[in-house]
Amino acid sequence: MKNLDFLFKPESIAIIGASRDEKSVGYGIVANLVKGGVFATRHNESFKGDIYPVNPKADEILGLKCYKSILDVKNKIELAIIAVKAAIVPLVMKECVKKKVKAVIIISSGFAEFNEEGKKLQEEAVSIAHNAGILVLGPNCLGLVNTHAFLNASFAPAMPPKGEIGFISQSGALADSIIDWALWKNYGFSKLVSYGNAADIGITELIEYFDADKETKAIAVYAESIPRGREFMRAASKAKKPIVILKAGQHETGMKAAKSHTGNLAGSYEVYKAAFKQSKIHEVQNVDELFEAAQVMAYQVRLKGNNIAIVTNGGGCGVITADNCFQEGLNLAVLSEDTLKKMDMSGKMHPAYSRSNPLDIVGDALPERYEAALNAVLLQKDVYGLIVIETLQTMTDPIENAKVILKAKEKFKDKPIIAVFMGGKFTRMGKLFLESHKVPVYAYPMKAVLAMKALLHKKV
Amino acid sequence: MADSELIRKYGIPLPVAKIVNTKQEAVDAAKHMGFPVVLKIVSKTILHKSDVGGVKLEIQNELQLREAFEAMEKNIPKKDIEGFLVQRWYPGHWAFIGMKRDSQFGPVIAFGMGGIFVEIMKDVSLRIAPITESDAREMIKEIKAYPVLEGARGGIKADTELLVKILLAVSKLSMENNDIKELDLNPVVINDKEAAAVDVRIIR
């Protein structure tokens, strides 16, 4: 594993190409380091280490003394963020070598992603860094954020809330929007990194580093292409933490005609899918799913066997959920005689309850009936997980139901329980209660089914 | 090394076959190995032999064999024919096993059922080599047409462990022969007792 601490936990940072122009990237990066973020939020915190803006034309930026060259800085510099024109990046890199910088982030674009000349510049800059043992992130990237070190070494709008999801993104712009979304949804990240052209550090190194990172519980990845596929598979297979991936670019418009059948059948996306499956990576199809799956995999226990139960106070919702389970390959357990007997004996069941899975406990179910049903079903050995659905009726008590669900979760620690509180205004309090206790709760069944499927793919 | 020798070296079963030059030799060979047989042209210049009428499957008797032979002689330019292959025909399901060397992931192994299942339905499972035995079993069960191998609707119940062996052999072959870019075993005939790669195509 490559130690990337100098990138994610530097003690001192220089910004080469720092600027006074508020509309420039060179300003945004300095502002993010100084204030945590350009857009003010309560999660922004200033970087606690030393910050050295470098710009030959300025004396001061955001109250910090500005240097003509990185070589003019007397103290040591661990991380240099480079935001100058591509053409002079090799020159700047040589200065970084002289200054004994440990890691650089090349924000600038105009390299391999642009043209042949850019590709040469990229190779030149990276080889200078390699020879001196300097880590390189980028070029053509957003930078990175480490919420636990109050480090916003990027031109992202703000610092996302602190959390335990590590996000690795090939795209920088996507990461930007995710931060804004995370602030709105109060969704936390441990670290967030965009790796751009991945001239040196790429998805494989980042997965290995995040897997070893104490502050990260689950890894979310957005990627368009994965070079060095076999190394990536090895890293992902070895990783102990759950990895969720959103692979974009699934449809090739101009797939080359291959000579063999296999060549035609094994399109690049199909190969990726096989690689994900073999390396136990959970694949999703949407951005919201990416983070929902990461969240649920970070905090919920694994679904140890593909056999679950559905408990609902609405028959229709139970059927929808069962359909969704079927679509996603989740099996429904057969409720045993013993389980049914336990419910009958409880004296809490409606005479017309369904007696089969999905278990419809009828619309007038009060919290105590939910409790009796949950207890009986979860005691059944081959029920490995549970989706519990609440629809809102006159006698429904969302908060008390939520408490019953939490109690069941605490009692049956090795079985994942996922709630669906269908509705909006009046179910909201119950939902908030569950969310605050890290019980996954969704507004409709498919989300719960996808979350359960993610837990089936969890390694440990 | 000739393709068939390489295939044999990795323990992939090939059907009993003989290369002949004349119609009479073809008939003798067929009688020796027993009908039904397959007749195929041997050609370096023609890659897709069935497209030019150079493959006749399930020949049941001498008369059919003679007719097939004559048709090939008539329809295919002499310069493209180096000889004729008479091959035993195995009743059973047609499976498909292949390999493609991917630029990022290396050799990718493919499995499906032959004919329309792979060509039209694209019902195929893939894994990156090297694969394990359990990967191979998963690949077989993963395709939608799997019930066919299980003997759905009164069909033959295939001994899928024979397919597992071939999948593992293709995985090993592709790891040890970097010059092979693509490989098709299509069809692999499989029944309750035996399996054989009836047609092999290797692209280097």
Image (cartoon, grey):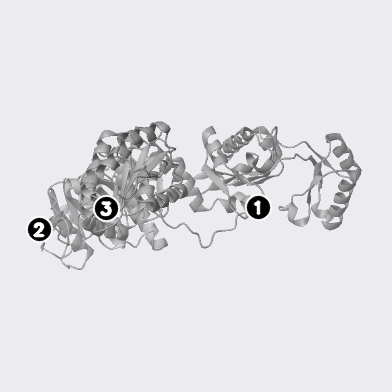
- Where residue A229 sits in the image (x, y, percent)? 45, 45
The answer to whether residue A135 of the structure is visible from this angle is: no
The residue pinned by badge 1 equals B116
The chain letter for the residue carrying disc 2 is A
Q: Nearer the viewer, residue B156 or A78?
A: B156
Q: Nearer the viewer, mark 1 or mark 2?
A: 1
Image height of A142 relative to B146, above or below: below
Real-space Cα separation, disc 1 to disc 2, in angstroms: 71 Å
Q: Nearer the viewer, residue A385 or A247?
A: A385
The answer to whether residue A181 of the structure is visible from this angle is: yes
Image height of A373 relative to A324, above or below: above
The residue pinned by badge 3 equals A105
The chain letter for the residue carrying disc 1 is B
**Residue at the image position 9 percent from the left and 58 percent from the top:** A65
- Where residue A415 sits in the image (x, y, percent)? 33, 36
The residue pinned by badge 2 equals A65
